[in-house]
Image (tube, coloured by chain):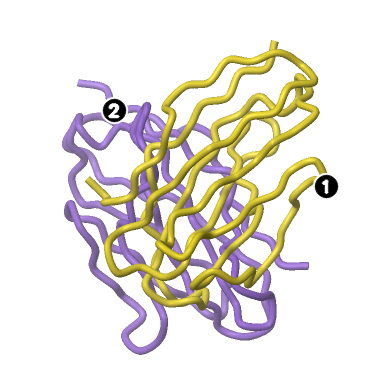
Chain colours: A yellow, B purple
Amino acid sequence: DSGVTQTPKHLITATGQRVTLRCSPRSGDLSVYWYQQSLDQGLQFLIQYYNGEERAKGNILERFSAQQFPDLHSELNLSSLELGDSALYFCASSAGGSQGSPLHFGNGTRLTVT
Amino acid sequence: AQSVTQPDIHITVSEGASLELRCNYSYGATPYLFWYVQSPGQGLQLLLKYFSGDTLVQGIKGFEAEFKRSQSSFNLRKPSVHWSDAAEYFCAVGAPEYGNKLVFGAGTILRVKS
């Protein structure tokens, strides 16, 4: 058990809809990362927050947004969903904010857009 | 741009045989190097990491990896594979000049035959 909690585990929704994925980091970790894993793109970094502030941005679409709250949990919002957004979305946390800090991954949220 | 290459998509080994999974990266300086393992339905678990110092690093579950600067490689090895090692393995690289994100390879799926 990594200590990172993601909810829900599965999400099925229709195109055009909006969903929110939730992540609780390991106790004491200040950084939260979001990754998207799909068969054709592999693991793609979306965005990182450190202690409530955006620290780094990757290949995140404009339809997607995220935030980290004062209690350090994070939410990833996906809107105007398309079939291609179907993927496994991982949250990871780390103690520090640099790429030298090992990441601890949750079990992911599997999103299916129909 | 940075890249991480895992040339083998699938590898099949017999239980008890040795294993080597290849990883090559393209960066100017010595990056931070990681190997993660993902079992079906699970998140990624850190096996080992290399930052500096001894180029042979030991990880969990009997795995080790060797950093070779001249070959820009960080190959993962295990002397004797167990059936429970069947999973997907990801090499990941981080570098200060590329911001606070890890770049992952495409993964290698390991099958173990009895």
A112 vs A1, left or right, is: right
Quadrant of the image occupied by residue B52 = bottom left
Q: Residue at x 55, y 78 (%)?
A: B31
Mark 1 falls on what kind of element?
loop
A30 vs A112, left or right, is: left
The one nearer the camera, A27 or B39, is A27
The Cα–Cα distance between marks 2 and 1, rounded to whole angstroms, is 42 Å
Q: Position of residue B92 (x, y in %)?
A: 51, 60
Tell me which amino acid carries mark 1. Glu
A12 vs B66, left or right, is: right
The one nearer the camera, B42 or A75, is A75
Mark 2 falls on what kind of element?
strand
- Seen in the picture, residue A106 relative to B83 is either above or below; the reply is below
Q: Residue at x 49, y 76 (%)?
A: A97
Q: Which mark is residue A62?
A: 1
Q: Residue at x 44, y 29 (%)?
A: A8
Q: Position of residue B35 (x, y in %)?
A: 40, 58
- Look at the image and tell me in which quarter the N terminus of chain A lies: top left
The residue sitting at the front extreme is A70
Both marks 2 and 1 on one chain: no
| Chain for disc number 2 | B
Q: Nearer the viewer, mark 2 or mark 1?
A: 1
Disc 2 target residue: B112
| Chain for disc number 1 | A
- Seen in the picture, residue A11 relative to A58 is either above or below; the reply is above
- Look at the image and tell me in which quarter the C terminus of chain A lies: top right
The one nearer the camera, A24 or A112, is A24
Tell me which amino acid carries mark 2. Val
Q: Position of residue A46 (x, y in %)?
A: 66, 52
A68 vs A2, left or right, is: right
